[in-house]
Amino acid sequence: MKKPDRTAAGDAFALFSISVIRLASHLTTAGDALAKPAGQSSARWQVLAAASHASMPVAEIGRVLGLARQGVQRIADVLETEGLVRYEDNPAHQRAKLLVLTDKGQAVLHDIQTRQAAWADALGAEIGSDDLTTTTMILTRILDDLVKKNR
Amino acid sequence: MKKPDRTAAGDAFALFSISVIRLASHLTTAGDALAKPAGQSSARWQVLAAASHASMPVAEIGRVLGLARQGVQRIADVLETEGLVRYEDNPAHQRAKLLVLTDKGQAVLHDIQTRQAAWADALGAEIGSDDLTTTTMILTRILDDLVKKNR
DNA sequence: TTCATATTGACAACATGCTGTCATTCTATA
DNA sequence: TATAGAATGACAGCATGTTGTCAATATGAA
């Protein structure tokens, strides 16, 4: 039972995919480490950051982050229990309350972002802006190709 | 409560991180789609592929894939229930049985790999080997930097 | 050879994502 | 204006990963 043949470009894409997934796993772990001193995680941090950027309903945050609405809802409810966010009435929609950071939530987010800035600065300096910028452009193009393909 | 300042390189690294995580999420989804016609998923496929490459104990597969041994164990047990793998005695270790593909498991893996080859060939051709190869090299270097940083 | 240490599998608890279903609330079109 | 369809939150169930703990088994050093 042999492995099916791939073209050289196919092999290149397969290797590329594996390294992207590996690296993403490590980056998420690093994000968890940055958020942990504040008692948070990557997922909670993303929700806090989205709500900080602009108060929006949970479903809107899901769209912005590219996640299912229900997962964001569960995290937002936990954050509310911990007093980091609160639901405010939405003048434009009776059911879809706006998610807003509390003072405590803002302090926690700021703490995480301070640690993240030092971490990103250090790694950015080590790797170099040029490589990061060109690579990000290629990654974005590939993401577009992937999304296009699934449409 | 302002967002802490980052250097230009820090900004570049932050943007890069986001695109890596986004792309990895889409690639995993694509992998699930490739495995689904065979009734499998990305995670099961990775375990099948590892066992196919060489029969090894569950803990060894976990190390190869960079996953916790317990998660691999749960998946391997499910694959055994479905008759895709079996545990064989390990002459080198009484407890750590070797995970081996059954004929059915090999057929399922081959089916997935055939679909994956066509998919990788198409996207590889669209994006181009050059960009893929250079990007993969940079990603690998960044992964090394990350791992080094956490040691 | 003995014994401290590491490895392994089993089991349990939890975090984070997904899909599906339902009732409620908006929204846009006929 | 009515009303069909879309959007939203609530709730439930599942997949995949994590950590922690325990007993059984290997392994290496004294």
Image (cartoon, coloured by chain):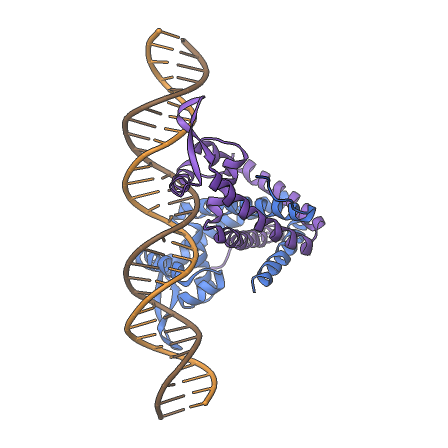
Chain colours: A blue, B purple, C orange, D brown
**Residue A102, how many percent across, how many down?**
37, 61
In the displayed structure image, the side of residue C5 where residue B55 appears, left or right: right
**Depicted B108 relative to depicted A56: above or below:** above
Residue shown at 40%/43% (left/top)?
A: B82
**Can residue B47 be seen in this snapshot?**
no
Q: Say which of B140 and B116 sits in front.
A: B116
Residue shown at 42%/66% (left/top)?
A: A59
Residue situated furthest right in the rendering: B130
**Residue B2, how many percent across, how many down?**
49, 59
**Depicted D1 relative to depicted B90: above or below:** below
Total marks shown come to 0
In the displayed structure image, the side of residue D27 where residue B128 appears, left or right: right
Q: Say which of B131 and A100 sits in front.
A: B131
**Depicted A64 relative to depicted B110: above or below:** below
Q: Is the N terminus of chain A in the top left, top right, bottom left or bottom right quadrant?
A: top right
**Residue B12, how many percent across, how many down?**
61, 53
**Residue A87, how many percent across, how many down?**
34, 66
**Depicted B42 relative to depicted C23: above or below:** above
Q: Say which of B148 and B114 sits in front.
A: B114
Q: Quadrant of residue A45?
A: bottom left
In the displayed structure image, the side of residue A83 where residue B93 appears, left or right: right
Q: Is the C terminus of chain A in the top left, top right, bottom left or bottom right quadrant?
A: bottom right
**Can residue A57 be seen in this snapshot?**
yes
Residue shown at 40%/60% (left/top)?
A: A72
